Image: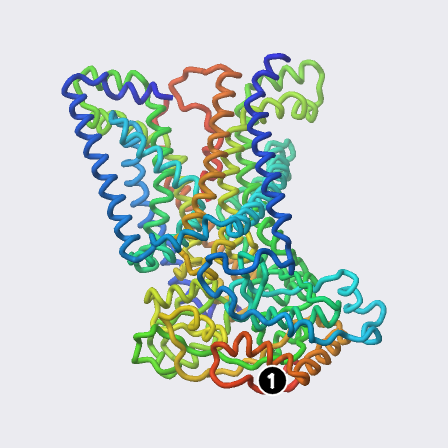
Amino acid sequence: MNPFSGYLTELGHGLVTTVELTVVTTIAALLLGVVVATLRICPVPLLRTVGLVYVEVLQNLPLLALLVLFVFALPQLGITFPLFTSAAIVIAAYEGAYFAEAIRAGINTVGVGQAEAARAIGLTFSQSLRYVILPQAFRAVIQPMGNISIALLMNTSLAAAVGVVELTQTANNVNLVEAQPLLIFTGAGLAYMLLALLIGLVTGRLERRLAIVR
Amino acid sequence: MNDPQRLLFDEPGPRGRRRIRIATVLGVLAIAAGLAVAIHQFAAHGELAADRWRPFGTWPIWRYLLIALWATLRAAAVTTVLSAVLGLLLALGRLSRRRSLRLLAGAYVEIFRTVPVLLLIYVTLFALPAYGLNFSLFWKLVVPLVVANSAAFAEIFRAGIRALDRGQAEAGQAIGLRPAQVMRLVVLPQALVKLAPSLVSQLVGLLKDTSLGFVVSFTELLYSGQVLASYTHLLIQTYLVVAVLYLVVNASLSKFARVLQARNGRLFGRRRTPTAPPRPDDRALPTR
Amino acid sequence: MSILTKRLRPRRTVAIAAASVAVAMAAAGCGGGGSGTPGTPGGAGVPGLGGTGVVDQAVYDAAPVAADADIPAGSTMEKIRQRGKLLVGGSLDAPLLSQQDPVSGKVEGFDASLARLLAKYIIGRPEVETVTIGTQTREALLRARSVDTVFQTYTITPERATQIAFAGPYLTSGLAVAVKKENTTIHGVQDLAGRKVVVGTNTPAVTALPTAAPGSEQVAFATDPQAVQALLQGRGEAYVQDFTLLASNAKVNPGMKVVGQPFTTEPYGIGLNRDDAQFKEFVNNWLTKIQADGTWARVWQATLGTVVEGGAPTPPAIGSAQGS
């Protein structure tokens, strides 16, 4: 009667794939976000434009369109990656734009005096960014970045549309055999909610420990 | 907007200017190299051949794509109206003085903020028909989108209403308005004007969500792109054109949001505070 | 007041611009003409199928029309006749079965042509409106009467027959195996055990493969064109799908070929609402008629006949499948 019991291994694999995809992608997107945010505020006008164009393009295209383009169209040019890697690259590139904007918003919150002080003691652009601005900027936007991570988690479900067998796809497959859609999809939904809750708890903790009270 | 960025570096001196020039030249070279590799890959696989692009210069193909874009916009418009109304009700519910309403609205928002839209689509596709709830393709796409986006809209509205100066509501009460009247006549009109940019930004996310029509085979832009690609076998070209269409529409919407933001800046004056500019969408999901 | 109106101006211009774009697109939408209206003739420099799978107009012209006596007042047939078009659930991306020509907007192929012939039988003109449906939404759409019929390589099964009714079967096919052209190791489903196999999400292959090819690993894609691309890109060694669909794909994609014979038997039926025995009988009578007068064979020749060897097969006997 219980449609889960016979499929625990499959559902477990799906869950693990979703978690893997989320973790790998979050790290990659975060690094990318720092790079793009730096580009957007650096002294070189050309690089600022590059950062701006990156954010504009990636934020204004549907993730699904990017996935389809990358997985089905790019191989026409002889560029083929495994499905999981493809999904990870695309989602990281997409969410990287959002992390970049969050980090930039964080940089904007850092007091004017901080940047002036950094310059006054002779720090270069990259030094003041690394030692003064970014550490403070990150602390200001822990909550928004947590939200982006949650959005990223939910977006990993789109990898199902390009053949990655993660949690949503597994649920779909199990449902095809068991025909118990409400039960199975509610179960999968609960799993996503728990994962999101976990991210929320971690960011909440980080925020309490690191946030700067002004 | 530029001020904080300017502060990170001095007006460059001779050495700094030289470095910027070097970095610019290197950047141009890198971009040129990237373009060259891309063009080479296209050419090496014959994707640059004129007859692989010619169809996209013909009216019938464009008419097909524009009809698809029209379907995308229609789905986005209906989703917007419904989720905005539902979102507003949910936000009012969360701010209500009745505990049960607060809990109910809160639970709804928290649940549907953290469940993937794709999963909701599967539920409308596979689960609901078994209970006699069976929609046309259009609604099979729109209903899950409304469920998810109304939660996001509710968070935007709630943040906006709470961000409004308390004095406004108190002044309303002082002149003898009932709570509902205060909300309707004093708080909401102001909150909505201030929220306009965030709401338009949310529209971009929502419009992107309609690409999930791909999954329910509703003939919006992305799905039509696939039908077109399967007919013409021009995958790269079709999906690139589809991407450009999305980009044009969404970039216009984003631009519109910035225009509204700038106008609000002028309307309400720029408060110079060390904290972040009010970002009511911080708690709303920025992407989907 | 004046301040406000002044401030609002930019928004108004944007709104007007947006409105005019919308109007332009609505105009394009109308010009597109939904169902059946022949647009610009096909071709127009579009590579691809460009014309194959199109049944001659003469076949439609010669096709039978039901006598008025067969369409009693209050019946589903009468409603369809009054509406002036048949609502058909089907695909837009199945070559030679039901594929839309983006240029003309017409849907062509074996399933699409039969649907049009049924429309002609009821209405007198081959007017159909194709509603795109996914493979898992068909029963629901029929039960809700969102569509009159489903023509979509729809396998008749006893389980499905508890929810809907099937007219036919009108064609027998089965799951088969396709591989890349250069593959010489896979000759049929028996060689798939333990291999990576591309399938369509929610297709019979998902449930048939574990028994037919034990230990095979499935890579599922939502649509047939995606699955074909996946096979050609080497994301799986084989693609298991309906034989007619694979044969059609192989025709337009020189990079792939069908190997072996179908390893299951799938009788395809026309999906109908369950509580409408009158309509089912009517559709079955029509099927018998077009099979007897050779129309069925002519449609098959013009579509699937272009990729399947040998002449038109003998159509399956009406009601021969369990559940029909």
For the question of whether residue B102 can be seen, the reply is no
Residue at (50% x, 68% y) in the render: C95
From the image, which quarter does the N terminus of chain A lie in?
A: bottom right
Q: In this view, does B223 lie to the left or right of C62?
A: left
Residue at (74% x, 78% y) in the render: C281
Residue at label 1? C315
Farthest top residue in view: C2
For the question of whether residue A89 can be seen, the reply is yes
Q: What residue type is labelled 1?
A: Pro
Q: Residues within 10 Å of mark 1 (few under 14, many from 20)?
A: some
Q: Is residue B74 left or right of residue B286?
A: right
- Displayed quadrant of residue A50: top left
The one of C314 and A67 positioned closer to us in this rendering = C314
Mark 1, secondary structure of its residue:
loop
Residue B107 point in image, percent of width and height: 56, 43
Residue C168 point in image, percent of width and height: 65, 80
Residue at (47% x, 43% y) in the render: B246
Q: Please, which chain is the residue tagged with disc 1 on?
A: C
The one of B81 and A73 positioned closer to us in this rendering = A73
